[in-house]
Amino acid sequence: MEETALYPPIEPSNFDLIVIGTGLPESIIASAASAAGKTVLHLDPNPFYGSHFASLPLNDLVSFLQSQSQSQSQSQFESQPSQTSDDYASTPLVTRPLYSALEFNSYSSDPIDSSRKFNLDMAGPRVFLCSDSMINLILKTEINQYMEFKSVDACFLSDAEGKLENVPDSRSAIFKNRSLSLPEKNQLMKFFKLVQGHFGSESEEDKISEQDLESPFVEFLTKMGLSQKLKSIILYTIVLADYDQGNLKVCKDVIDTKSGINRLALYHSSIGRFSNANGAIIYPIYGQGELPQAFCRRAAVKGCIYVLRMPIVAVLMDKDGGAYKGVKLGSGQELFSSQLILAPHLTIPSTLAPAEQVTTCHDVRLSDTKEKVARGICIAKNSVNPEVANCLVFFPPRSLYPEQITSVRVLQLSGNVAVCPSGMFVTYLSAICDTAVEGKKLLSAAMDALFCMPISGNSGNSETDNLCELTEGKPCLLWSTLYIQELTTFQGAFHSINYTPMPDEHLHYNNLLDATEKLFQEIYPNEDFFPTISVSDDLQDDGGSEQDP
Amino acid sequence: MHGIPRKALTEEEQGASSLKSAKLRDLQSQVLHFHHNKIYTEEAIEISAKLLESNPEHYTGWNYRKLAVQYRLDRRSEDGVDSESIQSILDEELRVVENALKKNFKSYGAWHHRKWVLSKGHSSTDRELRLLSKFQKLDSRNFHAWNYRRFITALKKIPDEEELQYTTDMIYDNFSNYSAWHNRSVLLSNLMEKGGKQYDKENVLGEEYEFVRNALFTDPDDQSGWFYHLWLLDQTLKQEPVFLSSWPPNGSNLYLSLDGRLKGQQSLPILHFQSKARKFPLVLYFSEAVEGVSSSTVTVEYQDGDSLLWTPLSANNFGFSQAWLTYLKFPDEVPSSEALPVKVTIAHFPGITSSKGMPCSQSCHISFSVCVTSDDQEHSEVQSSHRISWKEENFKARATQSLEANLLHSFSKLEITKENKPSTPKWSMEIISTEIAHCRELLSSTNCKIGKLTLARLLMAHKTLISYGIPDDGTEVHYEDILALYQDLMKMDPAHICYYEDGYTLVLLKQLTSNIESLLKHCDRYQESSSPSTNPYLCVRLNGLSLSRIGSTEHLLWVQMLDLSHNELRSIEGLETLQLLSCLKLSHNRLCSFTSLEPLKKLKYLEVLDISHNEIGAHSIDTRRYLCSSPLTHAVGGDWYFQKFVDGDVKLNNHWDAYLLFKDLNLVQLEMIGNAVGDERFKAFLLKLMPELKWLDGEKCR
């Protein structure tokens, strides 16, 4: 067998933990387990780190999206499960398609021609607030030595015409803002101070009442006398509400005042945390795919063994009790561990699952009715705002069309964060949706607002490029893709087998990190999630040494 | 740096610091040795660098280095010009300064040394700008850096427009930056002075008001923007000084007599002036403090025609004053029946200039006539033998006296007339009205003290512009609103209550003197009921009004009798302009020292003074007293005969301030009961000091 010759056998063959998939949650767990002194084997069938959190060259992104959009059983790869040793029952692993409704549009050959100069995020748009819990973890684990960051220069609020207005997110931004009226400036700053007072002051007088804290945030904002525009700014650009908070009856995720002001305070504590960051928001150079990779490097330093390009064909179960024993690799080698972590796109077919795991089957079938996230990537030659290179754009509910009930969030990045060739701009879009149709409608409307589509369609003709370069003052699309990603996550399926969370719909990693930490504590209830090693961590915190000077 | 708390030193640090100071002392004595012996060897200079780098505050060290550099430069130029070695000497200086500034970037000596090196003209100004941007990143409000920046930009001839953009950027970055706002005001002043279409005053002020308004609305509690706003307001109202009023008033008829009797001309008692010396004061009052009033800028045409000596009537000695005084003399041989014309011309040629440097460019005239009445010896001593009792029954309601109304009416003529109307442009009213509207809008949602104070100032500015005859544009302003604002402020911010009380007082006095009717309400005729034969006084009664200072005296130049009792007066600065004052009641106020009564020394006709029930002597420490003349200042001059009056009484030795005040007063009557000072010995001291004194605390003493 030629294939197996490619894979030298892995030594040893017994581990405390085997992790399959190098997505962010898997990488964090591998790193945390290694730090806790566990023997860890980290496998990924792909030739790159990051799985669904990776940043890839343009061509690789396209083929990965395509490969992950159809169901394929790993067992087809290795069609003879009979090779398993007699002691264990072998259950084949099935890849669940995470992506659907793929759509690619190429208006110019330029991006494809320089495919390798792109580092496109699979799970974009995503950024960090300087005070995010993820940034704290990055500093604590000192993986900041593997990463560099740059500031996102500006945040904009947009309407359906693509008219961008600066988000007045700080004192000086309020001062500079040209679209707010004077009383609005006064109200907004007063509100910011109110929240600062709530957190900063000892006196009870400055605290927001318990009753207010439990009320919907939108009602509290109304009570504080903020105008519609200001409410929209706070809710959708700072607190990052997904759903229209204006109609509380149908809103699926009502944000209460407590979490609203927590988010606002987090945002404000981010401004000025690092002296060389301009605002609250930063982005890693070379893309978000750097993050799982950095955790993998830290895991490796702590003794975790890494094998990429290694397909896993089956899970080995105890014949009698059906308990998890190990995995069978594409190479045919069998490896054993006490715990197994699976990336969310891998499933064990329900028919083969032992009888007691009813809940899992239930979950898998439910996934169709659950929410999805629509993602889009656009490549253009110009910035959506000529004055800034890297920026966020928010389309709050009802800003694009009256029936829009969820926010569309947009992140534009330039060559200065090494995600695309200089002279081009990459734009990520996302919106939460119930159906693929709805998701695509949302993203298309946002793209229409920001870009102009080349008239001649999908040809690679460079003449048309020039013709439409800056029609209506909007940048012209060179290439784009839209895809729908599932959000369903499996939890605690089998004893000793756990699934990591999916790339979620958020702009930040807070929820993912919480879920990952929880998962780690479930597997290792007696271990610290990255124990604090030395005092030097605190120093690191202040210095902001992870920044490119 | 701002907002960084100090930490107490640990024991370890204390040990290190005493070690360091020992080292410093050693370095210091070495450098002083080099300095005294003019040793400028490389080693010596190196040691001075060490000293300055660890203690940049050592001024002598910097001076030594300047001498050393000069010495070395002179040596080099003797050897022939070698720009490279000059460069290296100066570069070394810059390096030392840079290290010193790293130690303390607010060191005056270090910044000054750097300026000195740069002014030699051999160093790169670009490098300095880069260094400055580093310093301003560290602390954007460091005024040393801003100061140095102005020096460098002048050296490098960077246009003001460019620097203006820089301040805009800095303010956008963080608008709580007094230094940036200040630099902006400096640059705009220059640009407006140069003029041009783009920097036309009206445009600039309009844009700047809008710019700063964003800061004020965003954070009304931040004061830096408000300070800039205050500068803008000042620029909006800035105008030439104008002549406001005079005594004797324009068009009046003055009676000058040797005695106190009126003969037939009962009509105008207050234009009757008694003087044995046959002279009377001429007072000119301007809209702001001016200098340059002299016989060459003001011509007075009258019979005598001697050149006149003008003196400023002001508490400070800088030569600027709102009121100027001279005396007109009428010799004996003048026939008594004739009215002698006097014509005063305030010339428009340059000469009279305000303290802000604005010239008084409009000429104006006043004229009046003087009748000198003949002597009448039999009554000459009558009036002064009576004690002024200030009793209520001696005051007659002014309502019956229509002649005072007439008189005051004639005074109103010396208010702003067409001739001396200020040149304030119409747009200033638009600006003030807009600012009033915005300020009111802000205050409707924010309770902010500096906003209230600004609104009070804006409303007052509006009133002032109206008084200049600029048409109102629909904004109604009432004095009551302004007074209410100050009363609010006193409650809101008791820490600064004195400031608000002063503001309140000035507005109130402006209101009282704003028209004849309101002023007449405070005018009463005083006449002793027991002796109806004596001249009646027209008394201005401003008692019980919570006044904390003096103001609006331009409308009161004619007052001879003034009641300021039962107020909150802490100072009487400004009373010196009321040259005709002869009876003054200051009882029940908060005057706490004799030095605070210094303005009275300029009132040559003051005979009756009531300072009872004040706080004189109650405060053991009077900080003000050191601002005034004292035995320690030169102002006292040669007539210091204090010891003669004290006569060895140790307890009186402390009363040099009383001596300084009363030796220059010619009082006939003094009330000072109810103060912490005033025992029998002190009274005896006063009697000795003032030989004219007849009544002391209600008792006839001579």
Image (tube, coloured by chain):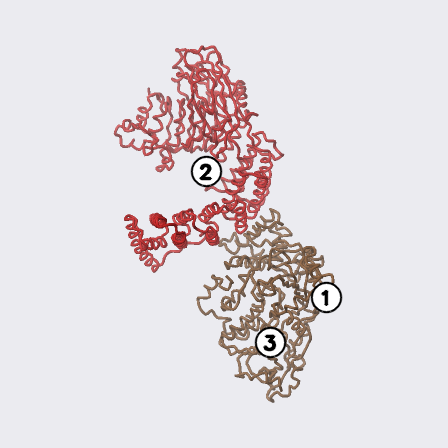
Chain colours: A brown, B red
Cα separation, mark 1 vs mark 3, equals 31 Å
Q: Quadrant of the N terminus of chain A?
A: bottom right
Question: Looking at this rendering, what residue extends furthest in the bottom direction?
Answer: A86
Compared to residue B642, the image places residue A301 above or below, namely: below
Cα separation, mark 3 vs mark 2, equals 78 Å
Indicate which disc residue B591 carries.
none
Q: Which residue corresponds to the image point at 48% horizontal and 38% vertical from the top-left?
A: B500
Q: Which mark is in front, 1 or 3?
A: 1
Residue A240: x and y in percent read 61, 60
Q: What is the secondary structure assignment of the residue under circle 2?
A: helix
B648 or B246, nearer to the observer: B246
Write down the chain letter for disc 2.
Answer: B
User: What is the number of callouts on the image?
Assistant: 3
Q: What is the secondary structure assignment of the residue under circle 1?
A: loop
Q: Which mark is in front, 2 or 1?
A: 1
Q: Identify the residue position indicated by label 1 in the image.
A: A459
Residue B527: x and y in percent read 45, 18
B381 or A205, nearer to the observer: B381
Q: What is the secondary structure assignment of the residue under circle 3?
A: loop
For label 1, count other residues whose C-alpha is less than 10 Å away and answer few (under 14), some (14-19) or many (20+).
some
Direction from residue B33 to residue A486 in the image, left or right: right
Residue type (three-letter) at the residue carrying disc 2 = Cys
A211 or B688, nearer to the observer: B688
Q: Identify the residue position indicated by label 2 in the image.
A: B498
Direction from residue B496 to residue B478 in the image, left or right: right
Question: Looking at this rendering, what residue extends furthest in the right direction?
Answer: A456
Residue A468, visible in the rendered structure? yes
Residue B139: x and y in percent read 47, 52
Residue type (three-letter) at the residue carrying disc 3 = Pro
